[in-house]
Amino acid sequence: MASIIVDIPPSMSIVVDHPSYSLASNVVTAHLLLQFIVLRKLQYLILTDDNPFEQFCTNLFVGGDDLNPTIINGKIIAEEIRTGIAAEIRQMKEATGKIPGLAVVLVGKRRDSQSYVRHKIKDCEEVGINSLLDELPDDCPQDDVVNAVSNFNKDPSVHGILVQLPLPKHMDEEKVLNTISLEKDVDGFHPLNVGNLAIRGREPLFIPCAAKACIELLLRSGVELVGKNVVVIGRSRVVGLPTSLLLQRHHATVSVVHAHSKDPERITREADIVISAAGVPNLVRRNWLKRGAVVIDVGTSPVEDPSSEHGYNLTGDVCYEEALQLVSAITPVPGGVGPVTVAMLLSNTLDSAKRAFGLS
Ligand SMILES: NC(=O)C1=CN([C@@H]2O[C@H](COP(=O)(O)OP(=O)(O)OC[C@H]3O[C@@H](n4cnc5c(N)ncnc54)[C@H](OP(=O)(O)O)[C@@H]3O)[C@@H](O)[C@H]2O)C=CC1
Ligand SMILES: Nc1nc(=O)c2c([nH]1)NC[C@@H]1CN(c3ccc(C(=O)N[C@@H](CCC(=O)O)C(=O)O)cc3)C=[N+]21
């Protein structure tokens, strides 16, 4: 193990005890450590895996230890969005006598899926969207799900169709999702919607809700996107991929980290903004983050906890307590991205109804 001691008068020393730092890089930055040590009146500074050298030096460049991070409140932002949607729906009802409709297809009894669907239905009621729920058993044939979708495709009172993912293992998700009619694809998962999101100058009919939520949270918190280095962790159809595409439409410089990425800590530590959607609890530790970074934590993994009300706790991808020590803003889990994702679903459903009623 590398262990370097730099003598600094008067009677101070620096101990760099870390396998991955060469003598050369330590010598170059030794004067920065000196400044820090004098400033803090420290006798020793021990760098470990949790507090690596490069990150430490980045922090030093940025300055003091007095960041007071903003906790981005997704519940309040979602409520503001819902208030606007409810007002538009009241006007729509006065003008046309009609309201938007959202149909949800839920297969199986996953507790977290049931909970999200309950949230969606409650929020629909609150803003004046009519909601329909088709619940199917875990072991039903795929054709039953396809038929449920087809019926909703034909129903003129339905403007949005959502098939809650994941589907049971024996089903072909791609096939089921492709049966949703393009005009009712409020999740924005249809290949044509994804393709149009990816191509400059084209307009998708719908943009996936979690991606929209991330951007909305950033913009409403006053975070500039143009030219910023953004790292998106995850590249799924539901979150990672559409988020990276939408960020590029906002002129951010986007890097995508996934399960095969080498040295994800180093890549993520470069980012001004980190959006994490891996679904791995506490993946992003302190040493993944640059001081002053903005963090949007999309991950919501149910982690077993028999002592909690529902038998599990929703846990984010980001080690929240550690991140709080150095970020400038962060979304909590729960109460961050989740409620805004649902608000975006309502917004997409409203947009779809407006198109159907010739109001847009
Ligand atoms: N709050 C909200 O509104 C929403 C939250 N979610 C949550 O977001 C999370 C992600 O959802 P979803 O995208 O559907 O999940 P998926 O499992 O479909 O995708 C996960 C992505 O993360 C990547 N990944 C997995 N492990 C690692 C790792 N160790 N390091 C880096 N990347 C990794 C995968 O890489 P690879 O492609 O190489 O396999 C994949 O691209 C979940 O917790 C989900 O519950 C989802 C939707 C909305
Ligand atoms: N077709 C489809 N579209 C989706 O958008 C989709 C999906 N399938 N499958 C699962 C993921 C996950 N997802 C969430 C939505 C809201 C919350 C949410 O509201 N969370 C609350 C807490 C909810 C609770 O307490 O149960 C919060 O974070 O505060 C979470 C996760 C949408 N997804």
Image (tube, helix red, strand yellow):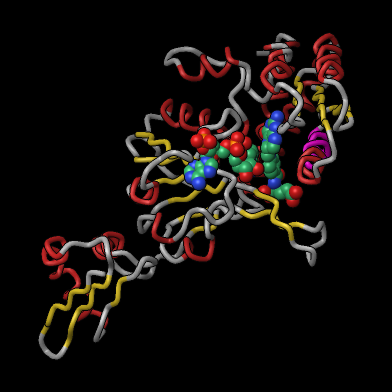
Instruction: Give the number of marks.
Output: 0
The quadrant in which the C terminus is found is top right
Residue 42 in view, yes or no: yes
Q: Nearer the viewer, residue 215 or 297?
A: 297
The residue at the point 17 percent across, 78 percent down is 5
Q: Which residues are magenta?
A: 118-127
> Horizontally, is 11 left or right of 334 in the view?
left
Residue 340 in view, yes or no: no
Q: Please name the predominant secondary structure of the magenta segment in the image.
A: helix
The residue at the point 12 percent across, 82 percent down is 8
> Horizontally, is 252 left or right of 186 in the view?
left
| Magenta-span inclusion, residue 123 | yes
* Ligand 2 falls in quadrant: top right
Q: Position of residue 145 (x, y in %)?
A: 83, 20
The quadrant in which the N terminus is found is bottom left
Q: Nearer the viewer, residue 74 or 52?
A: 52
Q: Position of residue 104 (x, y in %)?
A: 81, 28
The residue at the point 36 percent across, 59 percent down is 291
